[in-house]
Amino acid sequence: MNELQRAEYLSVLGIASYVPRFVLPLAPEPRQAELPPAEPDTAADQPLQQANNPLPQSAGQIVDVPVIQKRDTVAAEISALTSSTKVQAPAKPAISTAVAAPSQQVKPFVLNCWRLGETLLAVDSHEPGAALPLDALFGNIVRALNWHELPRQQERLHWPMAENRFGPAADASEARDTFSSWLEASCSRYPVQSIWLMGREAQEFCTPQPLESDINHWGSARILPMPSLSQLLQQPLRKRELWQLLRKAYPAETRAQ
């Protein structure tokens, strides 16, 4: 790669100049970039060649014409050309610039995740610092389905993952990529039969596919969008809505209730 190609690559990447300060381990030895071959400047040599060439035979006749008559003739020709044709500057090619999608900033939130063996993965979203008995309410829901004796694992995820005061705020696309990838990897390693996405953030950022109904099928698992535990505690009437959904999704577990 010569120096001109290297400069073009750097300009496309948005880097004004780049010079390595040291050689990385196992990196090849640095070498001077090849310069492009010099091109002959034919345009600069053309006036010299014309100066060495003798005048044409009609040059003597042009000299004999009176200066005033020649000037009037040239002015008339220029006037005729300008009046008949209009000289237009060549149109500049349109440069297409990529328009970045508007970023949607996301407020900090917390995801409480419970795994009950191979039966359930529940993801509940709530605001950080909310002092509510979320674990007790989730335990009551699990007990109503007779799943309280299953092995339980709990995990807590925070957004943003790391606080960066000097960088740009994390947007919705980053949160969606992060948590949807986490859920897919978690279910691929430890498959479950049901996935509960409880709350707006869990349903918006964790779902691997659009939620089109109250019971969605994703491979061998079922995805159920539900109100968050915080909403159930703050709006107790929504517990009836949740119980109707559980009876529809798990008729055998809720038959005796």
Image (tube, rainbow, N blue to C red):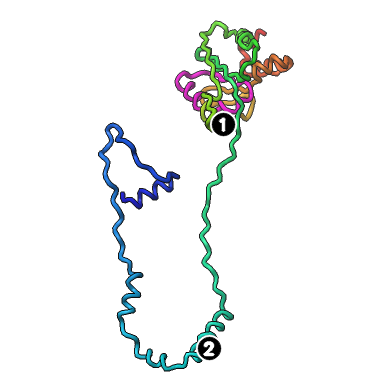
Residue 253: name its quadrant: top right
Residue picked out by circle 2: 72
Residue 185 counted in the magenta span: yes
Residue picked out by circle 1: 169
**Left or right of 55, for residue 232:** right
The label number, if any, that marks residue 129 in the structure image:
none
- Position in image of residue 132 (x %, y %): 65, 12
**Left or right of 165, for residue 30:** left
Q: Helix or strand or loop: what does disc 1 sit on?
A: loop
Residue drawn at (61%, 20%), measured in percent from left and top? Answer: 125
Residue drawn at (29%, 58%), measured in percent from left and top? Answer: 37
- Position in image of residue 44 (x %, y %): 34, 70
Q: Helix or strand or loop: what does disc 2 sit on?
A: helix
Residue 252: name its quadrant: top right
What is the three-letter code of the residue carrying label 1? Ala
Residues shaded magenta: 181-210
- Position in image of residue 211 (x %, y %): 61, 29
How packed mark 2 is, by other alpha carbons closer than 10 Å (few <14, some 14-19, many 20 or more), is: few
Of residues 209 and 159, the one nearer the viewer is 159
What is the three-letter code of the residue carrying label 2? Asp
| C-alpha span from label 1 to label 2 | 72 Å
Residue 123 counted in the magenta span: no
